[in-house]
Image (tube, grey):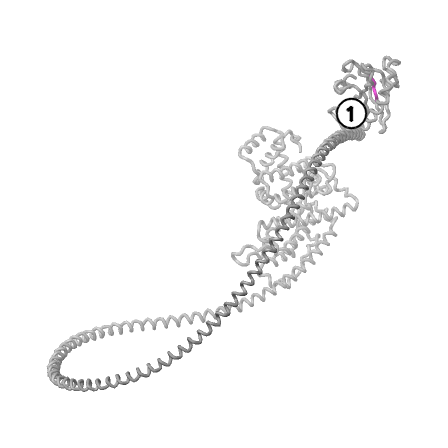
Amino acid sequence: MTVRDDNGISDELTEKIFAFVDREAGRDAPLSPEDEAMVEELLETDPAAKALADEFREVEAGLESLFQAGDDVPVSDDLIALIQAHGSGQKEDERATDNVVPLRRGTAGSSRQFTPLAAAASLAFLIAGGAFLYSFQARQVLERTVAELEQDRVVLQDQNETLQATNADLDGQLATAVDTMRDTETALAAARSNIARLETELSTTVAARNETEADLASATERLAALQETRAELEQRVAALETESDQAASAADAQRTELQGQLAELRTELEVARETERSAQTRLAEATGRIDDLESEGAALERKVAALESETESLSSDVVAREQQFEETETMLARVERRAAELAVEKAFLDSAVDSRNKEIEANRQALAGLEQQADELAAERQALAADVAQGREALTTAEAELTSVRQQSEAFQTGLELLRQQTGWLAQVAGYHIGYAGKPREVEVSAKEQADSQALTKWLSNELGRPITIPRNLPMKGGLTFVGGRVLPTLDGISVGQIAYHDNQDRLTAFCLKRNPTGQVQEPQRRQFFGRLQMIHWQDEDFQYVVVGFADFARLEPVATWLKDNYWQES
Amino acid sequence: MTGTNSIEDRPPSPADQLQALLPKLKRQAFGLTGSLHLAEDLVQDTCVRVLARLDQWKGVGRFDGWVATIMERIWSNRRRQQRQRQEQELPDPDLVPTPGFEAQADARLTLDDMRRAAGVSDEDFFLVTRIHAYDYTYRDLAEIFGVPHGTMLSKVSRAKAVLRKVVRGEALKADVPKDDDHGGAG
């Protein structure tokens, strides 16, 4: 998408000019009033903008005429009939007979005038065969559609009939309902007249009731008067009854007095009879007393006999008690004999106790001897324990030493393994370094033979594929003396250039470099040990470097740093 | 128009609407095919398919939009089949585009050919067709395609700016895109 049009008009402005032209054509292209005014002014002043607008107008006119040419596209009457068959309810009945698939009007029949643009239609001849195929397929589709529509029509007719039957049924129900309503209204009117009549009757009945109540009141008054009369009569009757009662009670008193006299006479007779009866009773009592005294004498005689037999049994008991006393005395004598035997036994036991005490004393003395022996043994054991502790301490010290030796050995092996794994070439350099260390003057190209070092640098440069220089004046305390250089072969086949120096103690110190096969950069310098051998190495994209020597790390480190920062700058 | 609205106060049936749409369908078909006969075919096929699918019309949205979409799909499918046939045969020498509307008519170059040569996508071509054949407004189109009013103007303006260059006889693409269903000038 270009920012500027070929007219020098931006896309944004082009769009606004297009919108302006489009609004001229009566469309709703969005354009603010300010933009519209701006474009209008621009079209008057800027020829390029006006030319662009004219071109858009031309496109509009061209497109309009092109699409207008579509008005000449023929449409067959059959197609219109088909559409109408779908659209109008009136046509439904005809659809079954009107089942004609519209075929396109013959192309020869088209008598319309073609616009020049429409002349493009001649291209269509090229694929007229294809068009026929389409119309044939369309006919098949239509035939299926019409058949489906016919089915739909039958179903709809059925539904229509059902609905009409339902409608008639509902009409009948409605008429019945209207009749019922009329009957109900008549009944309602009759009920209303009944209510009026009943109300009249009710008022009449109420008047009659009032009259009856008045009659009832007068009857009640008369009843009260009659009741008073009856009360007076009852009082008179009561007075008469009282008089008759008094007469009766006087007669009763006379009779009672006579009856009392009769009763006294009867009582005297009764007393006489009672006296006779008590005399007879006392006679019977005296007779019973005589009988009692006789039976008492018999009982006393029996008691005397019982006491005599009791006395006999007591005397036999005394005999038995005397026998018991004799047995007890015999037993006492036996007990005394037994006591004498026991005294003898006790004397024997006392002597046995004495001899046992003597034995105990002897045992105590023996025990004291044994305790003395135990003390001696304990002292001996303490001495032995001290010896054992000393031995253990020695053993621990020996084990600790062994462990530290093992750890050193493991650390050394680990370091060696690390060296081999991570920096295989460093291990080889270290190997060479140790190998050459004892022969300080044997180098491939001696510095003395090639005083200007030209031959050496040329040789190293060829081997390493980059101009190599000999760094001089390296910053080691005590100074480094350049002694020569060599190329070391390595296992991965990449040559290592070694530039050799001696420090002030004639110890071999070297700067080695080789092509970096992986291109991995190792910016910070790393330190490796190989026994006393110190190695400081790093790598950039092109080379791997190492400074190696037997000097202290502190002396070696400035050399490595200086080389890392300055080696290639110097060359 | 005959036989429309036989029952009073009832909205026109879809088929009646379809009949009323015929002039617009003709313009759309001619705009797409550039040929009276191919356009006649396309109108016929579109009407048959619309009538067969009237039960699918739910009355939601614009009926003319639904019909226009059906015609666009038929045309797209047909042109794809045509292109597949052409690819199996020799390339058509007539497809070499020539600038200008008159020249287009003489050389039987259709609007479709021109816009394909200029790299206007099917989608943008359909937008232009709907504007000119159906009198769609930008606001209608923006609502249908769910984009802002101004964005729709930009799409149409870019398509027409490309057509403008074709009219001027410049900026034709070197080769006609093989399949521009998803391509475009944007």
> Taking the image as drawn, is residue A43 in sight?
yes
Task: Give whichever of A540, B122 is nearer the camera.
Answer: A540
Q: Secondary structure at mark 1?
A: strand
A269 above or below A52? below
Instruction: Decide whether residue A566 is among the magenta residues.
Output: no
A187 above or below A370? below
Task: Give whichever of A186, A75 is nearer the camera.
Answer: A186
Tell me where residue A208 sits by quadrant: bottom left
Give how far across and how far down residue A123 sits, in percent: 72, 46
Find the magenta span and give its range.
A497-501
> Taking the image as drawn, is residue B101 in sight?
no
Give how far across and how far down residue B106 sits, in percent: 72, 41
A176 above or below B135? below
The quarter of the picture where the N terminus of chain B appears is: bottom right
Tell me where residue A88 sits by quadrant: bottom right
Q: Residues within 10 Å of mark 1 (few under 14, many from 20)?
A: some
| Residue at the image position 58 percent from the left and 49 percent from the top | B62
Task: Give whichever of A297, A255 is nearer the camera.
Answer: A297
Tell how many labels: 1
For residue B134, side relative to residue A119 (left or right)? left
For residue A451, side relative to residue A140 (left or right)? right
The residue indicated by pointer 1 is A529
Give how far across and how far down residue A253 sits, in percent: 12, 83
| Residue at the image position 59 percent from the left and 31 percent from the top | A43
Q: Chain of mark 1?
A: A
| Residue at the image position 35 percent from the left and 82 percent from the top | A295
Task: Give whichever of A26, A32 is nearer the camera.
Answer: A32
Give the main secondary structure, helix, strand or loop, of the magenta stretch: strand
Task: Inspect the image, locate mark 1, and give the three-letter code of the amino acid beneath it.
Answer: Phe
The quarter of the picture where the C terminus of chain B appears is: top right
Give how far across and how far down residue A377 sits, in percent: 72, 35
